[in-house]
């Protein structure tokens, strides 16, 4: 066998190569086919091992991985139980040592008491009292030692019970290990048989596919494409039908809710009329976010509202404590996001007589407002077109368009490129709906950017006004700031 060294190329360059005669005849007209083995030995290509197919390699590695997984799980189980048994044996040995030490202490106390008893008869006076006190202390120690022995006996029994349990568990684990090994061997054999059957089936399928050619594949591709086309044609129509059904159900639900609210109001009026209560005023308007409630006289003898004292309150739907809405002292009030799920109440006082008006139920949320706000939350900065109607309590004559920026960390009011105010969320900032102001109250909000600077902003729609309030309160809550109106208690879930 010929050995090829690493300096072969250098040797060829250094040595002179003799010319080959033209009469030389080579055995083959192509370069010899060989491979380099270990230690740069030349191997014949015929002696190379047979190259396995991809399917055989996958089948063999799958069987090896299954066998290794079974073996590892069984070994882990056995090692865990053996560790538990060793720990139980250690606890048992410690209990024995404690028991031996306790016995030695008991013997020493008995000897000490006997010695003190013998000494008691020999002494008198103050020494005798000291000896009696020492005897009492020894007896107390003996009682404590007896109690400790009882605890040790109980601990010994528990340790023995634990050792027996772990021993039984270890035996059960060994049995389980043997069963798992037998089961693993059976599964390996069945897996090998299944792999062999699959390989035979694949070989048979390859022979059949070669015989049939590409015709079956092309037909199958055409069928798949046709099925996909049919699915694409039918799926949109099904989705459209579902959308139409949902839209119809939403419309029916809205009509039912309106009808139920009307029935509730009529029922409340009928109950009050039965109780012979005189009606002077009533609440008019939809009890939902995005609308406004207005106190209207319903009798000719009703005093004028301008001469009455009015105060609005919010009450939890469970009938909790009444909360005063600071600044809400007009005949018109537009609910804000804080009022959703709560009952609104208006107290009218005239000449010492009080009239109380209450909504038929809790204030309903605006339809679609939640999804609209969730879509805006993903943005870093949300802009709303507004008009400044008041600044620091005085009317603002200009009706030019301003832009309110509601950001993750701060709020900003600007006009064109000029920034009017820009403040980070803080405890001095206040934000709520306008409490009064006529029919436009549902589209306006009150914002105190800082102490000494407050504005009333009018939005393009009720939805933009409520969305701005909800977004600002949500971002402020992320900054650990409860953003509310004057004298309001911000709920934690806001």
Image: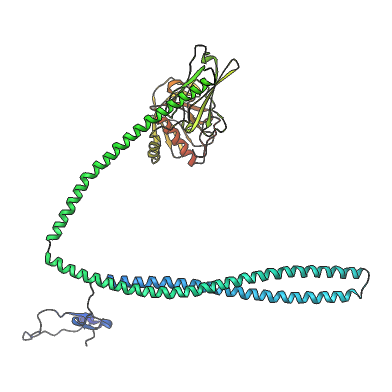
Q: How is the image coloured?
A: rainbow
Q: Quadrant of residue 39?
A: bottom left
Residue reaching furthest right?
A: 125
State the residue at coordinates (15%, 80%).
32
Front position in the image: 49 or 20: 49
Q: Quadrant of the N terminus?
A: bottom left
Give residue 27's position: percent from left, percent from top.
10, 84
Is 198 positioned to the left or the right of 471 in the image?
Answer: left
Residue reaching furthest bottom?
A: 1
State the residue at coordinates (16%, 57%).
220
State the residue at coordinates (81%, 68%).
137
Give residue 397's position: percent from left, percent from top.
43, 19
Give residue 275's position: percent from left, percent from top.
54, 21
State the residue at coordinates (22%, 44%).
234
| Residue 54 is at least partly visible in this image | no
Image height of 26 relative to 233, above or below:
below
Front position in the image: 196 or 86: 196
Is 164 positioned to the left or the right of 245 in the image?
Answer: right
Is 244 positioned to the left or the right of 458 in the image?
Answer: left
Give residue 145's position: percent from left, percent from top.
74, 70
| Residue 492 is at least partly visible in this image | yes
């Amino acid at each position: 066998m010929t050995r090829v060294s690493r300096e072969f190329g250098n040797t060829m360059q250094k040595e002179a190569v003799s010319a080959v005669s033209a009469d030389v005849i080579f055995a083959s007209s192509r370069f010899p086919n060989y491979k380099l083995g270990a230690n740069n030995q030349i191997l014949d290509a015929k002696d190379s091992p047979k190259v396995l197919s991809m399917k055989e390699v996958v089948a063999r590695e799958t069987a090896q991985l299954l066998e290794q997984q079974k073996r590892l799980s069984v070994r882990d189980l056995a090692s865990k139980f053996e560790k538990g048994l060793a720990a139980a044996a250690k606890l048992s040995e410690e209990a024995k040592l404690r028991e031996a030490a306790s016995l030695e202490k008991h013997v020493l106390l008995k000897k000490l008491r006997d010695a003190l008893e013998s000494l008691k008869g020999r002494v008198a006076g103050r020494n005798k009292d000291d000896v009696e006190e020492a005897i009492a202390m020894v007896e107390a120690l003996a009682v404590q030692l007896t109690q400790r022995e009882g605890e040790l006996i109980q601990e010994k029994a528990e340790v023995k019970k634990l050792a027996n349990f772990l021993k039984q568990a270890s035996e059960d684990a060994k049995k389980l290990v043997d069963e798992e090994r037998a089961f693993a061997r059976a599964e390996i054999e069945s897996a090998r048989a299944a792999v062999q059957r699959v390989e035979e089936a694949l070989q048979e399928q390859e022979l059949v596919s070669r015989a049939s050619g590409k015709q079956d594949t092309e037909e199958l591709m055409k069928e798949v494409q046709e099925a996909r086309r049919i699915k694409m044609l039918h799926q949109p129509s099904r989705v459209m039908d579902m959308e139409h059904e949902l839209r119809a159900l939403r419309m029916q639900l809205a009509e039912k809710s309106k009808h139920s609210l009307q029935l509730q109001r009529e029922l409340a009026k009928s109950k009050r009329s039965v109780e012979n209560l005189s009606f002077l005023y009533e609440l008019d308007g939809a009890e939902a976010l995005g609308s406004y409630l207005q106190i209207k006289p319903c009798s000719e003898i009703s005093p004028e509202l301008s001469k009455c004292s009015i105060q609005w309150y919010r009450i939890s739907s469970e009938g909790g404590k009444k909360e005063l809405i600071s600044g809400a002292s007009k005949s018109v009030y537009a609910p804000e996001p804080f009022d959703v799920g709560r009952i609104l109440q208006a107290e009218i006082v005239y000449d010492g007589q009080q009239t109380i008006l209450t909504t038929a139920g809790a204030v309903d949320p605006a339809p679609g407002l939640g999804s609209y706000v969730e879509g805006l939350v993903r943005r870093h900065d949300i802009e709303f077109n507004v008009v400044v109607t008041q600044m620091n309590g005085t009317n603002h004559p200009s009706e030019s368009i301003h832009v309110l920026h509601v950001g993750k960390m701060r709020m900003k009011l600007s006009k064109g490129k000029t920034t009017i105010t820009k403040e980070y969320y803080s405890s001095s900032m206040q934000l709520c709906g306008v409490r009064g102001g006529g029919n436009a109250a549902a589209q306006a909000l009150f914002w105190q950017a800082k102490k000494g600077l407050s504005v009333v902003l009018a939005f393009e729609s009720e939805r933009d006004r409520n969305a701005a309030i909800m977004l600002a309160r949500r971002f402020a809550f992320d900054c650990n700031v409860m953003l509310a109106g004057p004298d309001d208690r911000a709920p934690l879930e806001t």
